[in-house]
Image (tube, rainbow, N blue to C red):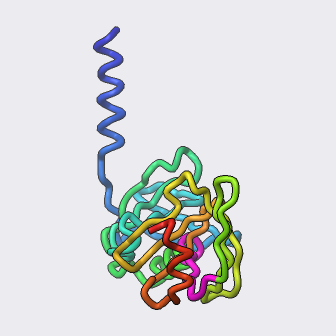
């Protein structure tokens, strides 16, 4: 019985660590509902999700294609988006634009710390915005000495590309996160 259980775990581990590459012969399309579908290896997936494995350092390489639902099981990896046919590439890029919408913060009006949350009032390249982050989480990530990504309580991302272009007052407001 113990040997049987071990085989099941080994099989599961092998399945989880197997890497399958998605190539130009596999076809992506945008559905009428605006979702991304995939036909690969004789299987049709009505809806798939695209995840950048290196979103900041290599955004168009190593894209994980996952089933929607089913615990996000990985179908395969696109090694280089530029190697995909134009129709598939456009459909994937559209999905990535929706998934990785990240307004860039250009001005900080205020940050208030209350009851374990920080409430931001900012100007972004998409307009004025207010959002909150949980102070007990890793909501602010340093990508470099001057670049920050901020994840709000709803998992929306905001970017500060260069902290050095902010005023001294704005930098002081960010001090608790740096």
- The location of residue 53, given as percent across then percent down, is 38, 63
- Picture quadrant of residue 61: bottom left
- The location of residue 162, given as percent across then percent down, is 43, 85
> In the rendered view, does 20 fall on the left or right side of 155?
left
Relative to 154, is 90 above or below? below
Q: Residue at x 60, y 62 (%)?
A: 155
Residue 154 in view of the camera: no
Number of callouts = 0
Q: Which residues are magenta?
A: 97-108
Q: Nearer the viewer, residue 31 or 122?
A: 122
- The location of residue 136, given as percent across then percent down, is 55, 51
Q: Nearer the viewer, residue 87 or 130?
A: 130
Q: Residue at x 58, y 56 (%)?
A: 135
Answer whether residue 28 is magenta in the image.
Answer: no
Q: Which quadrant would the C terminus be assigned to in this image?
A: bottom left
Q: Residue at x 37, y 76 (%)?
A: 60
> In the rendered view, does 158 fall on the left or right side of 59?
right
- Picture quadrant of residue 34: bottom right
> In the rendered view, does 81 fall on the left or right side of 131?
left
Q: Which quadrant would the N terminus be assigned to in this image?
A: top left
Q: Nearer the viewer, residue 165 or 62?
A: 165
Q: Nearer the viewer, residue 62 or 78?
A: 62
- The location of residue 38, given as percent across then percent down, is 50, 64
């Amino acid at each position: 019985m113990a040997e049987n259980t071990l085989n099941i775990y080994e099989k599961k581990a092998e399945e989880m660590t197997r890497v399958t590459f998605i190539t130009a012969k596999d076809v992506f399309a945008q559905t009428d509902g605006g979702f991304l579908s995939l036909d690969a290896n004789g299987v049709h997936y009505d809806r798939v999700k695209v995840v950048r494995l290196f979103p900041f350092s290599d955004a168009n390489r190593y894209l994980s294609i996952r089933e929607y639902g089913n615990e996000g099981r990985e179908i395969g990896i696109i090694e280089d988006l530029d190697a995909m046919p134009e129709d598939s590439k456009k459909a994937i890029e559209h999905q990535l634009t929706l998934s990785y919408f990240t307004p860039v913060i250009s001005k900080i009006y205020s940050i208030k710390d209350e009851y374990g949350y920080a409430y931001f009032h900012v100007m972004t390249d998409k307009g004025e915005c207010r959002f909150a982050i949980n102070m007990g989480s890793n909501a602010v990530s340093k990508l470099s000495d001057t670049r920050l990504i901020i994840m709000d309580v709803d998992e929306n991302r905001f970017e500060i590309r260069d902290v050095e272009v902010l005023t001294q007052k704005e930098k002081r407001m960010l001090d608790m996160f740096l």
